[in-house]
Amino acid sequence: MSISPKIEASWLEVLRPQFEAPYFAQLKNFLISERQQYTCYPAGSNIFAAFDRTPFDKVKVVILGQDPYHEPGQAQGLCFSVPNGIQVPPSLVNIIKEINSDLGANIPTDKGNLEGWADQGVLLLNATLTVRAHQAGSHQHHGWETFTDAAISALSQQRNGIVFLLWGSFAIAKSQLIDKSKHFVLTAPHPSPLSAYRGFFGCKHFSQCNAILLQQGLSPIDWTKIH
């Protein structure tokens, strides 16, 4: 697992101090040790996929997740997304159901690759960028949260008018990093089957997000681009 600043150029410029910080050297050593003992996800080349597909100056929307998927073939470095041919996880099924309800779309729930969102400016960021196979949360509290908090803070400080979609208590807690006088924060319960019926269904975040983008003269997101 290669953990070096092999990351999209605009993000490298913004996050260089993180790569050079002592905590990141410790994180790198932790990940090397983990890789020697366990299978870890995603593949090394996909650890920074969210940044690579959505350059810093192209970010229009941020969706925050917590952990990569931890079963074989699922994690691709984009929160909630799974590669082509992988069964769509329940939370993503519920996200698609809400898009269909909100936008009057007819997206099938048997495909879950969200790269089409990332390429339009939706940063699909997990707070922790790696995980040990079959063990959710196993790489939390080793430095990734410091790194991704720095990314969120940089967007807040250096950009304007970004729409942050924060689902569930973990993501909503990140709102403290966001300057709400410059950005837009939409919150809802998590789309997991345990909580989606408490207010994620019916939140209409996708139409609200596009309305905000249009008000700023920006192109809306085509949320149907799931393949």
Image (spheres, helix red, strand yellow):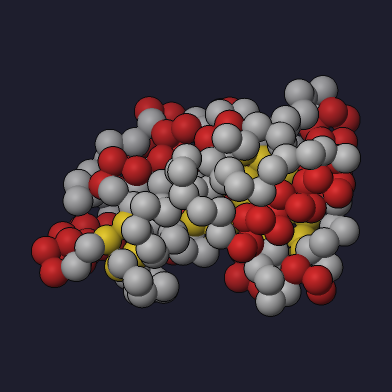
Residue at image coords 69%, 43%: 108
Residue at image coords 17%, 61%: 35
Q: Is residue 32 above or below residue 76?
A: below
Quarter occupied by the C terminus:
top right
Q: Taking the image as drawn, is residue 150 in sight?
A: no
Describe residue 78's horizontal placement relative to residue 188 as left or right.
Answer: left
Describe residue 197's horizontal placement relative to residue 53 as left or right.
Answer: right
Residue at image coords 84%, 28%: 214
Residue at image coords 26%, 47%: 44
Residue nearer the viewer, 202 or 145: 202
Q: Taking the image as drawn, is residue 72 in sight?
A: yes
Q: Position of residue 109 (x, y in %)?
A: 66, 48
Which residue ends up furthest to the left in the rendered image?
Answer: 36
Q: Position of residue 75 (x, y in %)?
A: 41, 53
Q: Is residue 109 above or below residue 56?
A: below
Q: Quadrant of residue 9?
A: top left
Residue nearer the viewer, 118 or 161: 118
Q: Quadrant of residue 222?
A: top right
Residue nearer the viewer, 9 or 153: 9
How many numbered marks have been drawn onto this rendered protein structure? Answer: 0
Q: Position of residue 190 (x, y in %)?
A: 69, 67
Q: Is residue 21 above or below residue 71?
A: above
